[in-house]
Image (cartoon, helix red, strand yellow):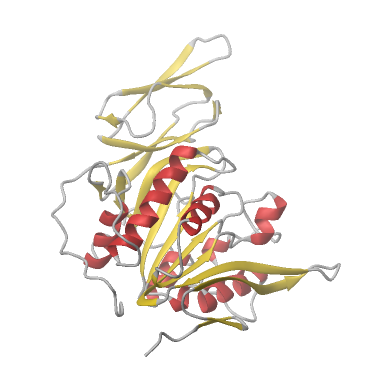
Amino acid sequence: MPRASFGIGPVRIRPGYAREVELPITRLVTGAEITLPVRVVHGREEGPTVWVTAAIHGDEVVGIEVIRRVLARLNPKTFRGTLVAAPIVNVLGFTAGDRYLPDRRDLNRSFPGSARGSLASRIAHLVMTEVVGRGEVGIDLHTGSFGRTNHPQIRADLDDPRTLALAEAFGAPVMVNARLRDGSLRAAARERGAAVLLYEAGEAWRFDEWAIEAGTAGVRRVLASLGMIDPVEPPPQPSLFSRSSGWVRARRTGILQLDVVLGQRVHVGDRLGSLTDSFGKTLRLVHADRSGIVVGRTTAPLVNRGDALIHIAGLEPIEAPAPLDPPIDALPHHDLDPDLS
């Protein structure tokens, strides 16, 4: 029996085809319609349904390019299963050059949303209904917030064996067992039974090539692990595992000089940098308050007392997960930074 077509919004997509769909969000005062762009790759052969989202925060553009590169290499004639890709979820924030929506709401604190709620709530409801609700596996792509940059990392519920297996397949340098945040896409999707990976890498409003490459390779590895595409090159080394992370903060105001880079291993007491005045006089040294790996840092030269400077994830050994058997039929934390999704 041939595979059934895939319905989304007002259209149906036949097996072996890809199609772009515009899902209505709202109308501007001029009458122009704002829509959510979605591309569906509906493979000719049976397989799982996976969704990939990016730019829930309008200034986080790395994921947009990741999705573009992933889609460019997929052939629906040989693809197994279905991929639903929404590269720009926060369309209004993206077009305005803003992280948030016009009403200043954070879209990633508005899920699962409501069809009759605020603009943020209605967008969240649309994404949950037409994108997230259709798949058993999801990958949500993010970057650091404004003034911060992140080392490539997966944040997920690593106590769930299936999610852990997917995170290992992704192969980011670091994976963090991050708690769920109320109102986030990841929390709402988990509530509906999906296994969700959140990818963090790079800086807002930057096409950081190293972050794009790691994200593109990771998404393709997940698709391969689910049997949706042919096997791809494995990661150069297994992901490091973390159960806790936290920020080293400035103990006084000054001009920041950093001595560490993303991905660097540090130990308690190591010098991370210094705070100076405008003439170069050292006001305070910055030291690591824990051991681990640098997964984030500020990009701001001037910092105030209490500002977050360096994000360090503690490292732990991890046991090998049970093998992941594709396709998936059905799928029934610790984060001290409020900006991380």
Q: Quadrant of residue 157?
A: bottom left
Residue 140: x %, y % from top left: 45, 60
Q: Quadrant of residue 158?
A: bottom left
In this picture, residue 313 sits left or right of residue 129: left
Q: Which residue is at the front of the view, 189 or 2?
A: 2
Q: Locate the N terminus by quadrant.
A: bottom left
Q: Position of residue 195 (x, y in %)?
A: 34, 68
Q: Nearer the viewer, residue 215 or 185?
A: 215
* Residue 237 is at least partly visible in this image: yes
What residue is drawn where x is 66% and y is 56%? Answer: 93
Q: Give the position of the C terminus as an image quadrant.
A: bottom left
* Farthest residue, direction left: 319
Decide if residue 157 is in sight here: no
In the picture as drawn, the residue positioned furthest to the right comes out as 30
Q: Is residue 55 above or below residue 265?
A: below
What is the number of callouts on the image? Answer: 0
Q: Is residue 236 above or below residue 159?
A: above
Q: Is residue 18 left or right of residue 325?
A: right
Residue placed most toward the observer, 139 or 20: 20
Q: What residue do we see at 28% from left, 57% from top?
A: 231
Q: For the view shown, which residue lies furthest in the bottom direction?
A: 1
Give the image location of residue 34, x and y in percent: 72, 68
Give residue 163's quadrant in the image.
bottom left
Image point (31%, 61%), residue name: 230
List x then y, in percent, for residue 174: 30, 45
Work out whether 256 lies above or below 147: above
